[in-house]
Image (spheres, helix red, strand yellow):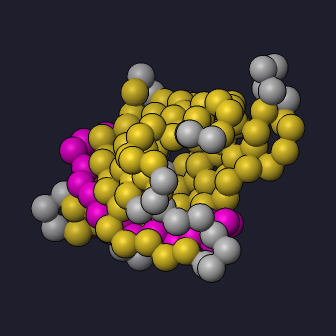
Amino acid sequence: MAFEFPVDLHPDLAPLAWLLGTWRGRGHGEYPGIERFQFAQEMVFGHDTRPFLTYYSRSWIVDDEGEIIRPAGLETGFWRVKPGKTLEVVISHNTGITEGWLGHFDGAKIQLALDHGYHAPTAKTVTDGHRLYGLVEGELFFAYDMATPEHQLQPHLWSTLPRA
């Protein structure tokens, strides 16, 4: 599917235009105390002419055949491009966590590091995180490394998502 550059895209967002649209695929996850799992994921990046991208991600735990077992994570947020190929990203999760991320982009590669986090009283505490997004052979690659008070920074999620 060919990507068309939106004519009403805010000029600040031009370097991230390749992200726009819906991406769907599968991934894997693991973490100490959590059995390795597979998931289906959908990420949607949009815009409304203002200088930020809207972001929405949802996922489902799946079996070896890709059949949905149950719903999993939900995230929603906003991505803002700043001078010097810098990004400011805010993401809120259905689990009671909201995070501020800082990062940079270089072409179709985006690296983010957790800047600040908030967790509701009953939510888990995330103390550090790194996210990687990239366009690899026409598909969106995503990886998330996470740290908690009990565990150092380590791989948690990774997925490959073709454009829908």
* Residue at screen point 41% across, 76% down: 50
Q: Is residue 106 shown in magenta?
A: yes
Q: Nearer the viewer, residue 22 or 1?
A: 22
Residue 151 at x, y = what percent? 45, 48
Can you say whether 89 is above or below 120 in the image? above
91 up-or-down from 130: above or below: below
Q: Which x, y percent locates residue 18?
A: 40, 45
Residue 120 showing in the rendered view: yes
Query: Residue 2 in the image: x percent, y percent?
Result: 50, 33
| Horizontal side, residue 40 vs residue 65: left or right | left
Q: Is residue 54 visible?
A: no
Asked whether, in this view, residue 62 is left or right of residue 152, the answer is right
Closest to the observer, 83 or 92: 92
Q: Residue at x 86, y 38 (%)?
A: 69
The N terminus lies in which quarter of the figure? Answer: top right
Question: x and y percent of residue 100 in the render?
Answer: 39, 70
Quarter holding the C terminus is top right
Q: Which residues are magenta?
A: 91-108
Considering only vertical position in the picture, is 151 above or below 49?
above
Residue at 24% over, 54% down: 104
Which secondary structure type mostly characterizes the magenta part of the structure? strand
Is 11 situated left or right of 47 in this image?
left
Single out the residue that lies furthest toward the left. Answer: 84
Is 94 within the magenta? yes
Seen in the image, is 148 located left or right of residue 80? right
Name the residue at the bottom extreme.
Answer: 121
In the image, what residue occupies the spot 22% across and 61% down? 86
Counting labels gives 0
